[in-house]
Amino acid sequence: MKRILSIIFVLALVAQAAAGQERIRERVYVATDRDVYVAGDRVWMSAWCVDASTGRLSDFSRIAYVEVSSADGTVQTAKLALDGGRGAACLTLPNTLVTGNYRLVAYTVLGSSEEDADLAVGARTISVFNTFTTERAEGGVTVVESAPEAPVRHSCGSLAVEPDGALGVKITNNGSTAARFCLSVRNADGIPAPESCGIEEFASALKGLPAAGGFRTIASEYEGEIIRARVTGTDASGIKALEGKYAFISSPGDGSNVYTSALDADGTATFYTTNIYGDQDMFLEIEGVNRGNICHLEIQRPFLNLPAGDIPALALCSSYVEALRTRSLGMQLERNFDDEILYTPLPRIEGQVFDSKRCKQYILDDYTRFPVMEELFTEFIDEIRIRKVDKERQLQVCATDALGNSYYPQGTALVLLDGVPVLNHEKILSYDPLLVQRIDVYQDAYFLGIRSFRGVVNFVTYKGTLPSMQFEDNVRIVSFQGCSLPMSYTCEGVGKGYPDYRQTIWWHPLLELAPGESRTIKCKAPDYSGTFEAVAEGLTESGEPLSQACLISSM
């Protein structure tokens, strides 16, 4: 169904262009909590996905891709979930990065569908200092005797940002439309930021974009990331024999990250997701593969590895030594004393979850424990029975018709272990029931993509990590980079006993103020005094850029 809807969306866009109307031309601007980092730091990001044709937020794409690049290539990536054109993410800079300036750029698949599109509109430059090595980016660092002046920060828009007591910031929307912005409060220690694109330059550049030369027809990510995989490990005839078979991808959890796709003639599978969050162990399997045909799926990377372009040289001065020592200390302490009290999860669009109201749950510790899985269904789980199909045992789930009569429908039930499909039911029947905490039984029919199932059974273990499960030879478990979990970094829970040398002391990527509305924010003071810079950046509902800053003191 998702694939059909995606095709309809693409056809609608083509029809729109044929009627002489403007196509959606997405460009992404990313603001960061700081402009200067040490290797190993976290980079907190806030994104605005804008339709260049209107200057307003685009409500089409649900994911953006972020690349941090040097002149030698991409050094770090992230995926950023979008909702109504806004999103938030976090990435960690590798501690192996050499000292130099780097380019940070974000884009959507829809934006990349434009032929010869300049996706680097709005790209930012960030400075990274590696305090553990003297290695520097070749030709990218200039040693100077005195620190250069910081670039002038341009103020624009109807947002007012002003000090309000010790480490307090008051933000007021003086405009006539809602303001959507991020706010960062960070240590102003004298290391100047590099020249970089701001939100005002980004908005201006959108107005000067040349006309689109053409558009490639691609599946747009209007629901979430579209994951593509390809069959490997077999020859062309083996791939052809797999055409039409179903492929599965999944990650351990509550079953919200289970997706299916029918294999094409060239051995490709396309999974339409509603975004998968966090770095996951992803399970990939092809249903109905002959046991002698040892083949598997390989996920294709979605990143474009855009060239960095011309990156200005970083100015390195001996006067930065003390400030860099403090920054390095703060980074190391945060990495070693990392705690959930520093972060606050923000709302996100959840994936598909089975209807909990239609679930019958069996907590196995409430019943007599059996050493054999089959005895569970014989003794007290009436909704499941075991039947042989083509000489192999399968689980069937009881259903209820419109008159309330119970029956066992023909068709395959979806069997999960900690949210991961077990296509060979013999594997679950031979599994140790003493490892299982509960069994969730869903008696309705469910559709995963175009694949239907007559009921769902999810075996949930105590550990939630599929302990001792032996999968088929064609199952592959790979590391998958999901969307970064949207978080604010307000550090309200920091108390005594935490060595607090944070350089960013307050960050929220998804703030909004109605016309005339004000908000006052009080920041938690770190274990050092100094001057801090509060910076707000964003767009109004009508597409007006917002950029304001002020200095505050910890006293």
Image (cartoon, rainbow, N blue to C red):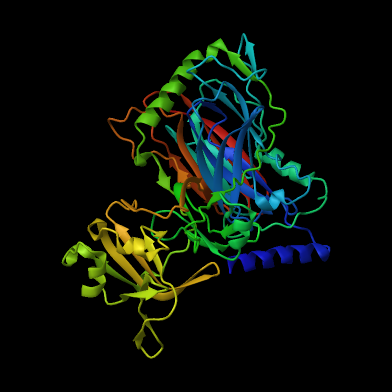
Q: Is 267 situated above or below 342?
A: below
Residue 216: in sight, yes or no?
A: yes
Q: How many marks?
A: 0
Q: Position of residue 212 (x, y in %)?
A: 81, 50
Q: Nearer the viewer, residue 53 or 337?
A: 337
Farthest-out residue, bottom: 403
What residue do we see at 61% from left, 38% from top? 67
Farthest-out residue, top: 145
* Among the 4 quarters of the image, the one containing residue 121: top right
Farthest-out residue, front: 292
Q: Position of residue 176 (x, y in %)?
A: 63, 54
Q: Nearer the viewer, residue 19 or 202?
A: 19
In the picture, measured across the screen, residue 235 lies left or right of residue 389, that is: right
* Among the 4 quarters of the image, the one containing residue 137: top right
Q: Is 459 situated above or below 30?
A: below
Residue 526: in sight, yes or no?
A: no
What residue do we see at 63% from left, 57% from top? 237
Q: Is 407 situated above or below 260?
A: below
Q: Nearer the viewer, residue 129 or 86?
A: 129
Q: Position of residue 437 (x, y in %)?
A: 25, 59
In the picture, measured across the screen, residue 349 lies left or right of residue 455, that is: right
The quarter of the image holding the C terminus is: top left
In the picture, measured across the screen, residue 193 lies left or right of residue 94, that is: right
Q: Is 246 situated above or below 523?
A: below
Q: Position of residue 424 (x, y in %)?
A: 40, 63
The quarter of the image holding the N terminus is: bottom right
